[in-house]
Image (spheres, rainbow, N blue to C red):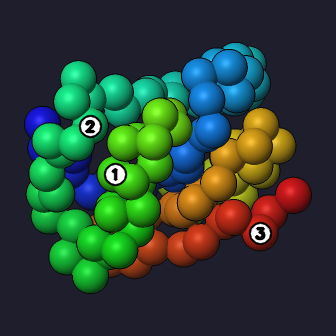
Amino acid sequence: MFIARPIDAVAGLFPDRAHAEAAVASLLAAGFAPFSVRPQQPDRCRLQDWGRDTTIMNLYLEGRQQGHVLLIVPAGRADRERVGRLLSHHHGHAVYHFTAAAVESLSILV
């Protein structure tokens, strides 16, 4: 499975499915449409078009291999902090906002 680099989206890892499901419920209630990246064989995932953001992708792949859940939430610049706070509130970590040209860490939002 290839995991493509998100564009105009916030991504984050969750320690388990329960935390991810709680985050999804909050995101849906707030009008966002998150989706979970659940490869059947996380150890066989490959990077696609991550360029200089490969370090972040490797962090996500390692988390998936350890059983963490990766959520990606389509979100433009105006909504990035709101989405980042919702993810962090539900124990999301490695939370980043991706645009076509840049990536911004949102992990410090509370």
Horizontal placement of 60 versus 84: left or right?
left
Assign a secondary structure to mark 3.
loop
Residue 108, position as x, y percentages in the image: 77, 69
What's the amino acid at mark 1?
Answer: Leu
Report the quarter where the C terminus lies.
bottom right
Using a 10 Å C-alpha cutoff, classify the residue at mark 3 as few (fewer than 14 neighbours), some (14 to 19) or many (20 or more): few
Within the image, what quadrant is residue 48 found in?
bottom left
Q: Residue at x 26, y 82 (%)?
A: 52
Q: Amino acid at mark 2?
A: Pro
Nearer-N-terminus badge (3/1): 1
* Labelled pair 2, 1 in contact (Cβ < 8 Å): yes
| 92 to 57, vertically: above or below | above
Residue at 54% in and 74% down? 104
Q: Quadrant of the N terminus?
A: top left
Note whether residue 75 is visible: no
Residue that carries the numbered disc 1 in the rendered image: 61
Q: CA distance from mark 2 to mark 1?
A: 7 Å
The answer to which of marks 2 and 1 sits earlier in the sequence is 2
29 on left or right of 103: right
User: Is 61 situated above or below 51?
Assistant: above
Q: How far is the residue under mark 2 from the one under mark 3?
A: 27 Å
- The tag earlier along the polypeptide, 2 or 3, is 2
Q: Which residue is mark 2?
A: 42
User: Could you tell me which residue is drawn at 68 percent across and 20 percent down?
Assistant: 18
Label 1: few (<14), some (14–19) or many (≥20) C-alpha neighbours in 10 Å: many
Mark seen at residue 108: 3
Label 1 secondary element? helix
In the image, what residue type sits under mark 3? Ile
